[in-house]
Amino acid sequence: MKATVSRAVMALAVCCLDESRREWSAAMLAEFEAAVTDGKPLLFAIGCLAAAWREMLTRERGRFVLTNYALVLGVMIPMAALQIGCALLGLPYLYPGQHGLSGALLEGGTHEGLLRGVYQAAIPSLAFLQLLIGLGHLRIAWVMLNRDWAGVTRSGMRMLAAAATLILFMGVLFLDSTQALLQGAVLAIELAAVSMVARWHVQLSPAAGTQQPG
């Protein structure tokens, strides 16, 4: 198990170095095999990964790669997990009263008795819209790693449409749409950050702005 983890860390360190550092990568791999023989592969691999990250921070392209991965792993995937969890598992965190979607009905108004049945019937549709937003986060995470910015734009537009539809339906059904509005605002901020990363990539590789996604 330790050897497998060590080789995985070493592979990640090599991937962090671009073509201009191929000789360094080859030297690290040769020294890694010596570290395996000495029984200290994991420590050596971690040191190589730290050195590769330091090297990346000294170059603009390296900083771009780290920023892109940080946005994917630190924002897109956690938000996808939260949205999908709320849609499929009824996690309560995005809705009032910690009761999930069923807690969003505004109580105390004359509409409550009239619309409760309609609202209960609409819950699957609302959950589906939220599921689309969560899956959209996963899709954007994937296409960001592939540098498919046209795909990012398409997925972002679909997510915004789903978020707007969710907010509209919740308003029509007299639901507390405060959290849905907040989610929409957070989504807009996320997509703005992704747009900035995309423009950064085009500046680094002008051809990327004209390439057709595969």
Image (tube, grey):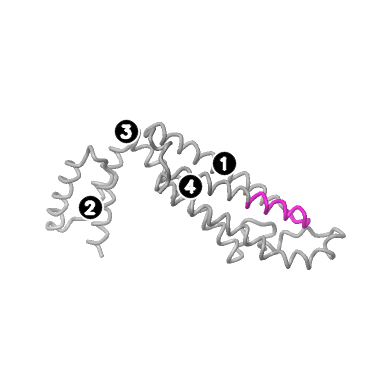
Hey, which quadrant is residue 24 in on the image? top left
The residue wearing badge 3 is 59
The residue drawn where x is 44% and y is 46% is 144
Dot 3 or dot 1: first in sequence order is: 3
Dot 2 or dot 4: first in sequence order is: 2
Q: Nearer the viewer, mark 1 or mark 2?
A: 1
Dot 2 or dot 3: first in sequence order is: 2
- Say whether residue 189 is magenta: no
The residue wearing badge 4 is 151
The residue wearing badge 2 is 43
How far, Cα to Cα, is label 3 from label 1? 27 Å
- The image quadrant where one finds the N terminus is bottom left
Q: Nearer the viewer, mark 1 or mark 4?
A: 4
Amino acid identity at mark 4: Gly
The residue drawn where x is 44% and y is 49% is 143
Residue 110, percent across and down?
Answer: 87, 60
Hey, which quadrant is residue 186 in on the image? top right
Q: Nearer the viewer, mark 2 or mark 4?
A: 4
What is the secondary structure assignment of the residue under circle 2?
A: helix
- Say whether residue 175 is magenta: yes
Residue 152, percent across and down?
Answer: 49, 46
The residue drawn where x is 80% and y is 60% is 107
Q: Which residues are magenta?
A: 162-176
Dot 3 or dot 4: first in sequence order is: 3
Left or right? Give the position of 173 relative to 194. right
* Residue 167 to residue 192: above or below: below
Residue 197, percent across and down?
Answer: 45, 38
Residue 106, percent across and down?
Answer: 78, 57
Dominant secondary structure (helix, strand or loop) of the stretch shown in magenta: helix
